[in-house]
Image (cartoon, coloured by chain):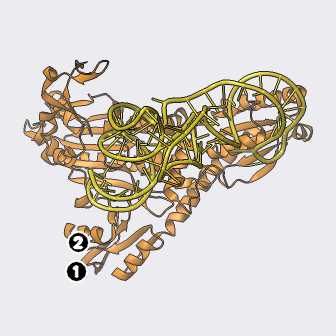
Chain colours: A orange, B yellow
RNA sequence: CGGGAUGUAGCGUAGCCCGGUUAUCGCGCCUCGUUUGGGACGAGGAGGUCGCAAGUUCGAAUCUUGCCAUCCCGACCA
């Protein structure tokens, strides 16, 4: 076991924090609830971002940027949205500081510099964007508008956790405007599918696609679609949301367009987002007591090469081989690091890169040179194998693929074992307190019942899965008639 | 925001209850040498606003008050 990391079994929270901090993804900062994303963590985010960005652009979206600050009058225009976020908004009230006459060397807010209208720091950008779209849309010919922005937002959270819930975080938010309801719903579902594909293919993290109940719906949305993932402690994590906003924002911001028959109508809207929370999800989905386990498709460093040598002569011989290998790997688009730093010995490096979740390690020593082999180690299983240097680049690339597949399969079977049906209240409670995970159970469809279940057990309905099987049953709590099972879980 | 815990060098810590020499130890860091197939060894060295600010006192890491930050548990939450 690692010397540096708390055991997942004994202290899951501490284990998670240790992975983030010791794995070099992020640091605490001087600002309450805010973290510093370190270069290694940011590189991971960049890889996620670049891939998502490509997927957004392939489906016709363009990036733009809207202001951080939203005038309060705009923010409050869509009532439900405003109310939903009101409690966690940071607000700018002044635009100037001045030296404090009573406190030498200190600054104070200049009371003369009070803003006439307060500015809300965006917790999300619907308001400022729909205010802008109003000016862009007159005719059906102006539609659809398919815009995404990569931005930071601030939500003043009571309790924060690295990556999972911080006061400021990075995300992308897509905001689209459409001429028809069907088109907007299709867009909502399309983006949900993109999120699911990204999570499963790149993050190697299986997700369940579903619809939120009214209780869990985004403030201001008609429908909230989501992808839900399962963490290793059996708790669910919402990893992405896609909202069908109906005409709510169009009405609030008076955004109308003329259709082909010259009839005026409000436009239909969607918004969708994923955030740096995905990094938290990724960490908890795969990692173990030795450190992070990153999927090859997103790992900032896919392959690390560690030389093992005595003396300069051996080092030079190794360097030569490594140089050739690195050229081949780089040509194939593999991100590779050669750690020939003499300060640390090989054993130290092995542990270090395991902590950082580098998928494949290559160790090359003098003995290997003689036999024309290297030692390959894969992070996910910690298996070591001796392989020929001939065609090594191909071997490594194949291994990266195999690891990607293997960690998905592992996460998938973990989850499969933890989707359990409960048919009465006793079973339901026992499952929640026991193995956790998703519990598939009947619900009478009322918010009141959902609230009651949450109050009693802290479990919420994570989603109603898409294409859910319809079957008659009785609500787990009330015994009232139900037409389908929904997925409950305790969640982050 | 409520309850609990913590804060001493980059990290982990002793000292605090019961105020009083030069603030303890390990890791890490720097220099030199030996090393290098799973977290090396020796010798020498550097590094401290004891979280911050007030207060009590002849004297505060130690006592008091306030504040800040982190963690855990609640409440809250995309």
Is residue A137 visible in the rendered image? The answer is: no
Please, which chain is the residue tagged with disc 2 on? A
Q: Quadrant of the N terminus of chain A?
A: bottom right
Judging depth in this view, the residue of A187 and A436 nearest the camera is A436
Q: Do callouts 2 and 1 mark residues in contact (Cβ within 8 Å)?
A: yes
Q: Residue at x 26, y 76 (%)?
A: A482
**Residue occupied by mark 1:** A480
Please, which chain is the residue tagged with disc 1 on? A
Side of B12 relative to A451 (left or right): right
Name the element at disc 1: loop
Name the element at disc 2: helix
Is residue A351 visible in the rendered image? The answer is: yes
Image height of A155 relative to B9, above or below: below
Residue A261 x, y percent position in the rendering: 9, 38
Please tell me how crowded label 1 is: few (under 14), some (14-19), or many (20+) other residues with Cα within 10 Å.
few
**Residue occupied by mark 2:** A449
Side of A136 relative to A312 (left or right): left
**Which quadrant of the view contains residue A470?**
bottom left
């Amino acid at each position: 076991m690692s010397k540096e990391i708390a055991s997942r079994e004994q202290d899951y929270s501490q284990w998670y924090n240790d992975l983030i901090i010791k794995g070099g993804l992020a640091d605490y900062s001087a600002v309450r609830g805010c973290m510093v994303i370190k270069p290694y963590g940011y590189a991971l985010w960049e890889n996620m971002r670049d891939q998502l960005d490509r997927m957004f652009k392939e489906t016709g979206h363009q990036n733009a940027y809207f202001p951080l600050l939203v005038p309060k009058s705009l923010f409050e225009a869509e009532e439900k949205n405003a109310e939903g976020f009101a409690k966690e908004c940071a607000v700018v009230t002044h635009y100037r500081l001045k030296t404090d006459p009573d406190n030498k060397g200190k600054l104070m807010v200049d009371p003369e510099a009070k803003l006439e209208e307060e500015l809300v720091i965006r917790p999300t950008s619907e308001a400022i964007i729909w205010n802008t779209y109003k000016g862009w849309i007159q005719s059906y010919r102006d539609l659809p508008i398919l815009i995404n922005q990569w931005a930071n937002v601030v939500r003043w959270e009571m309790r924060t956790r690295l990556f999972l819930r911080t006061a400021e975080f990075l995300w992308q938010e897509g905001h689209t405007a459409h001429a028809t309801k069907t088109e907007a719903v299709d867009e909502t579902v399309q983006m949900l599918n993109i999120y699911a594909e990204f999570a499963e293919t790149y993050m190697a993290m299986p997700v369940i696609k579903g619809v939120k109940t009214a209780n869990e719906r985004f403030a201001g949305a008609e429908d909230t679609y989501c992808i839900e993932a399962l963490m290793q402690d059996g708790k669910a994590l919402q990893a992405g949301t896609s909202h069908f906003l109906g005409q709510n924002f169009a009405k609030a911001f008076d955004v109308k367009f003329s259709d082909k028959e010259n009839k005026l109508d409000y436009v239909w809207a969607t918004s969708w987002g994923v955030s740096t929370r995905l990094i938290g999800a990724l960490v908890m989905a795969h990692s173990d007591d030795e450190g992070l386990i990153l999927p090859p498709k997103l790992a900032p460093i896919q392959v690390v090469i560690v030389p093992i040598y005595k003396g300069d002569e051996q080092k030079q011989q190794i360097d030569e081989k490594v140089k050739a290998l690195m050229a081949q790997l780089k040509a194939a688009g593999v991100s590779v690091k050669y750690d020939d730093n003499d300060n640390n010995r090989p054993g130290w490096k092995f542990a270090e890169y395991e902590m950082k979740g580098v998928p494949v390690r290559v160790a090359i020593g003098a003995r290997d040179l003689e036999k024309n082999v290297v030692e390959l180690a894969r992070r996910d299983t910690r298996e070591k194998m001796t392989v020929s240097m001939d065609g090594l680049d191909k071997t490594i690339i194949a291994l990266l693929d195999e690891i990607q597949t293997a960690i998905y399969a592992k996460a998938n079977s973990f989850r499969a074992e933890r989707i359990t049906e409960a048919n009465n209240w006793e079973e339901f409670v026992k499952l929640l307190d026991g193995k956790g995970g998703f519990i598939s159970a009947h619900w009478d469809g009322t918010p009141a019942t959902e609230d009651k279940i949450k109050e009693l057990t802290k479990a919420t309905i994570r989603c109603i899965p898409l294409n859910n099987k319809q079957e008659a049953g009785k609500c787990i709590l009330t015994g009232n008639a139900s037409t389908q099972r929904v997925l409950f879980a305790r969640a982050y």
